[in-house]
Amino acid sequence: MLEALKPVRVESTKDACIASLEALILSGKVKAGEKLAPERELALRLGVSRPVVHEALVDLAAKGLVEIIPRVGTVVNDYLKNGSLCLLMSLVNYQKQDLDPKILDGLLNMRKLFETETARLAAANRTMEQLEGFFSVIFEESQTEPGETAKIVALDFDLHLRLALASSNVLYTLLMNSFKPVYTTLSAVFFSDENVVPTVFDFHRKLVSAIADQNEDIAMEVIKDILAHGEDWLKTLLKT
């Protein structure tokens, strides 16, 4: 058994440095076209060596977040034009609330597109076993108090993941799983307002009922209502 154990991976200094610099850019605190502080100053502020900062900046440049210009410095890129798949992975792993409004809007709009389709496909393709899983989530929600935020976040994600699974589209499931860190971070903000919980649970009951009836149109209508409600409240909460 011991032979199967692998060394515990601890986040490297460079990775921690990358995460700190990414947060500045993804939160919009540093805008496209602005210069970052010189490497020496960044190293001092981050408490790391200058070579570590340089390696971190090279990594950010590879992702399209910055451009290192000789004799000029490190300039923040417009990541919408220069970002790569590596940047997308940084985004989905981002676990803070202060996303740049443009990124937040993009996430919410993308969610409308693929979750509306997953709800339709789930209603069309769900199996009896999958339907039982949906009902189990609804039952768990009925036993949950509004103040149990962590449990509510987990149940909410579980329901939406089950939609993707029931859609029979593997890519939708992988996409949903990939966005779990940022999804649950934002939904924790949303569900911190206990007043929204009964409304969401009611939406969930209607959605599962439509899936049980295999009514694709109603399933799509309900998921659109869920997403619109969530978007309005989330944007309001993040402004306060």
Image: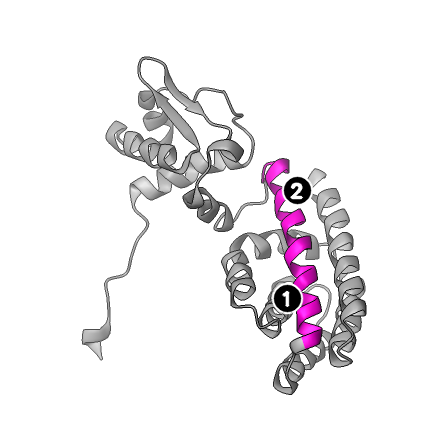
The image quadrant of residue 210 is: bottom right
Which residue is depicted at the point 23% across and 62% down?
A: 7
**Label 1 packing within 10 angstroms: few (<14), some (14-19), many (20+):** many
Q: Give the image location of residue 24, x and y in percent.
A: 49, 33
The image quadrant of residue 6 is: bottom left
Q: Give the image location of residue 100, x and y in percent.
A: 59, 36
Compare marks 2 and 1 and give the one earlier in the sequence: 2
| Residue under label 2 | 105
Give the left or right position of residue 3, taking residue 158 as reference: left
Colour convention of the picture: one colour
Identify which residue, 97 or 84, lies in the foreground: 84
Mark 1 residue element: helix
| Residue under label 1 | 160
Which residue is depicted at the point 56% across and 31% down?
A: 28
Q: Give the image location of residue 73, x and y in percent.
A: 36, 18
Whether residue 67 appears in this view of the structure is: yes
Amino acid identity at mark 2: Asp
Q: Which residues are magenta?
A: 99-124
Q: Residue furthest left?
A: 3
Q: Is residue 101 magenta?
A: yes
From the image, which quarter does the C terminus lie in? top right
Q: Is residue 14 above or below residue 35?
A: below
